[in-house]
Image: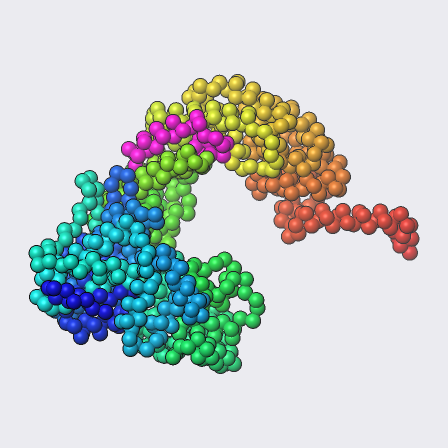
Amino acid sequence: MTTELPTGSAVFIGVRHHSPACARLVADTVEALRPAYVLVEGPADLNPRLDELLLGHELPIAVFSHYRDEERTATSWTPLCDHSPEWVALTRGQAVGAQVRFIDLPAWHPAFVERAVPLANRFADAEARYAEATRRLCRRFGTDSVDALWDRLVEVADPEGLPERLDAYFDLVRGDTEAEPGDRAREEYMARWIRAALARAGGRPVLVVTGGFHTPALRARAAGAGPAEEWPAVPEPPDGALGGSYLVPYSFRQLDAFAGYQSGMPSPGYYQLLWERGPSAAADALSEQLVRRLRARHVPVSTADLIAARSLTEGLAAMRGHPVPARTDVLDGLASALISEALEQPLPWSGGGTLAPRTDPAVVEMVAASTGDRVGRLHPATPAPPLVHDVEAQLERCGVVPGRAATADLTDPDGLLRSQVLHRLRILGIPGHARSSGPTAGADPTFTQHWEPGPAYGREAALIEAGAYGARLDEAASVALAERARAATAASGTTSTAPDELSRVLFDAVLCGANALSAELLAALASRARTIAALGPTGEVLATALHLWRHDRVYGMAGDPLLTEVVDAAVDRVFWLAEGLHGGSGVDPGRLRAMAVARDALRHADGLLTLPRAAAVDAARRIAADPAAPPDLRGAALGLRWSLGHGHGEAADRARSLAAADPREFGDWLAGLFALARDEVTGQGDDSGGSLPDELDDILTAMTDGDFLAALPALRQAFAYFPPRERERIAERLLARRGRRGSARSLLRTSADPLDLARARTLEDHVNRLLDRHGLRARDTAR
């Protein structure tokens, strides 16, 4: 376990992050050695602030590190809990008077971010690269997963001989594996710290605590220590870039492998018990917690179940060679006693990873109980990034109180500021308020926003982490939006939804008051609008740009020429794409929305457009008459012409011919028509309409039962374009045509499925015809 070096000795402890057994070994080693230095895998840029780390926080916490330049923002976390070997090394080392140091590169360094899979978590070491070695060990020891193997070899095993077992384990799993360039850079940097500490230790021991994957390489690299070895410099971010680290609260939920944590132990609640009480007591306490949680969730657990679970747990432990029950023994025993149905998914602790869909609810509760609900808390004296203080000042300035509802009137300067502050917090993912109503891209004008208070869990950590984007709230929101815009622009050549995402970013930028960014996004959209390959995304771009143009004074974009260019280009693109679209069936809401927004542009922004209204109406005429065009698009094209004052006499004739030709397409065609000319259909658009519902009634009444059943699903979808009040008026009209009295509203609110009613009517008619054929119905009536 130790290596003698010329200027002193280095003791290496390779650990698995968040392992209680490794943490206990570190504590015992520190107490026995009383080393001159304790060197720990962690961000070296935090060394000047180690006193801040040791203020007296309630764990778990994490060191949050960030980096930002003009091209990218990178973030990383270094989590610490009571049973983290790194935390124990720091605290116990300080207690015995050792000099404690973090010795790894800063998290923004290329060693972390310029790799095949960038590390969002410093402790997500290279386990995937030595998976084959661990699979062989699992087969050798008859375990289902690496976690169960680790428990058997380390956590519940006899602590005697643990250092040798750890050395053998990590030597085996590292083997001859070629480390990534990033890992090699980190290991060389950490070795320089070790050599420098050895040169200054005066013959006293130096304790090195790092992830076990790195330990074999560090032993070899640290062997060349010399008397003049200097402390390594901490790399600075490049010119023009910002980087740093802050402490944030963390939780057991975030630490749990079942929730997607990249490294370390699953079920942190169990390992906390293991750290506090030892293996035997931890198994009993875990069983108690599992049962308590299951009963709280109304999962029946009887005394007989508990006896069976305990017997199964002890039997499994004995069969697996565990001196005391391990975590998987407890979980398997309880699952076997409580779950009698066949499981759709394997038990999650048998393989690791996140919970799969359709996992049995009892299993979900067992995982949650073993995870624990502990949430960390920072000491009040912990420094926070400038953004935290700026947000507090901004909220006070605009009168927003956490935990209370807020209203913002966009026509009032104070209300507009309040809206911008709340939207900036939304963009940064800061919990606390959720908008319940307000303007949306492409919607009718709404100048009042309502925000409801939401759960504040994670707010402190989210604010600190958002500090990676900037020191001020407006700056941070702009940087976050620019990052989204770059991602959408980068994807523009590979996905047709990129312009759609750019339009969403644009609307968010306007809501946040990020005017400079809005100009950049408008320029990008203007260049892309004429090349978008699909109607749906084109419609979203047009909806956003038209909404901003129509209400430009509220949003502060009045007269922007780029906005005019986007509207013009998108309208032209909508008609070009629509006229070339052939084939397909069903209703596509995206293309119907695109046609509806193009109609609105022709209505409200005709003076902006290079496409004359007459040319647009003529294009719609060609689309409506094109038998190769999708039925919903043909209906939408006719609806567009009708809503602009053309072709109002065509609807009934086209409806009759289409219903006779293909009842299945009839409903799709109506959906397009209703989406574009709803008011005209009901007679609210102009005096020339209003008769189509009667024509449709006649068409549907004349259909055979089979044709009606075929058309009914699409018809239901089509009439969903009418709001409830308009559907009620149509129902009243139909009742009146039949000379019947009754409540149209109750007719619409029938609890039975119309498809079921239609099928029942068809079956009833079939039975009546069969009875008539055999003369049975008449005889029954006479009787």
Task: From the top left corner, tell me how far across and down residue 518 is, in percent.
Answer: 32, 33
Left or right of 340 on screen, residue 512: left
Q: Which residues are magenta?
A: 514-543
Task: From the top left corner, tell me how far across and down residue 567 is, in percent.
Answer: 42, 26
Please report the residue visible at 39 percent of the width from the left and 79 percent of the height from the top.
324
Task: From the top left corner, tell me how far across and down residue 170 is, in percent.
Answer: 31, 64
- The front one of 11 and 543 is 11
Task: Quarter of the image for the N terminus: give it.
Answer: bottom left
Please report the residue visible at 38 percent of the width from the left and 43 percent of the height from the top.
449
Res 82 visible: no
Judged by its main secondary structure, the magenta piece is helix
Does 594 appear above or below 752? above
Task: Quarter of the image for the C terminus: give it.
Answer: bottom right
Q: How is the rendered protein coloured?
A: rainbow
- The front one of 538 and 104 is 104
Please report the residue visible at 54 percent of the width from the left and 37 percent of the height from the top.
589
- The front one of 612 and 310 is 310
